[in-house]
Image: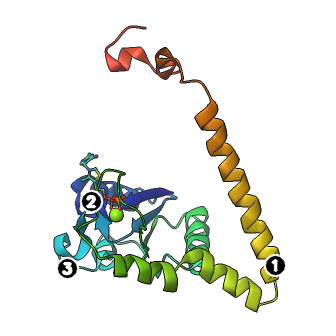
Amino acid sequence: MGFVGDGGMNTGRTWEAINMAVIYKLPYIIVVDNNQYAVETFVDRVTGGKDIAKRAAGFGLPSYTINGQNVLEVHQYVSEARERALKGEGPTFINALTYRYYGHNVGEKGQYRTQDEIADWRQNRDPIDGFSSHLISEGVITADAFEAMKADVTKEIDEAVAFAESSPEPDPASIMVDVDSGLLGVSK
Ligand SMILES: Cc1ncc(C[n+]2csc(CCOP(=O)(O)OP(=O)(O)O)c2C)c(N)n1
Ligand SMILES: [Mg+2]
C-alpha cells in the first residue's frame, strides 16, 4: 500500500508511479489521505477536474472515492483491493475523504478555514465516534466498555509521552546508525 496526501495528487511523480503500477499490474493499493488541505491550500482550488478518482480511472485502474471517516467502508474497499492485488489483477486507487483537525504543522496560524468547519467535522463526522456508536448500537460492545477502552488508550498514550519527555536527549551521532554514509556523501 502507498499513501499520499491530497497535496500529492497534483504532482507528476504520483501519476507516473500509478501509471507504472498499472502497466506492470503491480499488487498495489494507493490510498489518498484526502483531508482537503495541502498545508493551507484548499484541494478544490488547485485540482483541475475536481474529481481525482475520475482522473485515476483514466490510467486504467479501479478507482473509488469513499468516506474515509467510516471505518467499515474503508475496510471493505481496502479488502476488495487486496483481493484484486493477490489475484494478480493489479492496483486499485482509493480516494478516502477525511479531515485534519489540527494544523499541518505546529507553527501555522489556521487562517485558511473557520473554527466552525473544524467543529462541524469533529462533532458530526468523527470516525471514532461513528464507529463506537455503530458498535454500541449493534450490541458488539457496551457504552461502558467503550469508555473503559478509551481510558486505557489515553493512559497508554500519556505514559508514552511522559516516558519520551523524561528520557535523555539522543546522541546526535545515533542518527547515522544504519544509514549508508556513502549515499549521503559523508563519512562516519
Ligand atoms: C518533494 C516535496 N515538494 C514539496 C514539499 C513542500 N510541502 C510540504 S507539505 C506539502 C503539502 C502536503 O499536503 P498534504 O499531503 O495534503 O498534507 P497535509 O497538509 O494534509 O498534512 C508540500 C507541498 C515537500 N515537503 N516535498
Ligand atoms: Mg492534505
Mark 3: C-beta under 8 Å from nearest atom of ligand 1: no
Measure the C-alpha gap from mark 1 to mark 2: 38 Å
Residue under numbered circle 3: 49
Which secondary structure, mark 3? loop
Query: Looking at numbered disc 1 in the image, what kind of residue is underneath it?
Result: Asp
Relative horizontal placement of residue 82, taking residue 34 as reference (left or right): right
In the depicted structure, whether residue 137 falls above or below residue 116:
below
Identify the image quadrant of residue 38: bottom left
Judged by depth in the image, the label closer to the viewer, 3 or 1, is 1
Query: Looking at numbered disc 3 in the image, what kind of residue is underneath it?
Result: Gly
Residue under numbered circle 2: 109
Measuring from the top left, give residue 151's x and y in whole percent: 74, 64
Give the number of marks: 3
Which secondary structure, mark 2? loop
In the depicted structure, whether residue 186 falls above or below residue 36:
above
Measure the C-alpha gap from mark 3 to mark 1: 46 Å
Measuring from the top left, give residue 1's x and y in whole percent: 51, 57
Which secondary structure, mark 1? helix
The quadrant of the picture occupied by the C terminus is top left
| Rendering quadrant holding ligand 2 | bottom left
Q: Which mark is residue 144?
A: 1
The residue that appears at 70% across and 46% down in the rendered structure is 159
The residue that appears at 27% across and 59% down in the rendered structure is 109
Measuring from the top left, give residue 182's x and y in whole percent: 38, 14
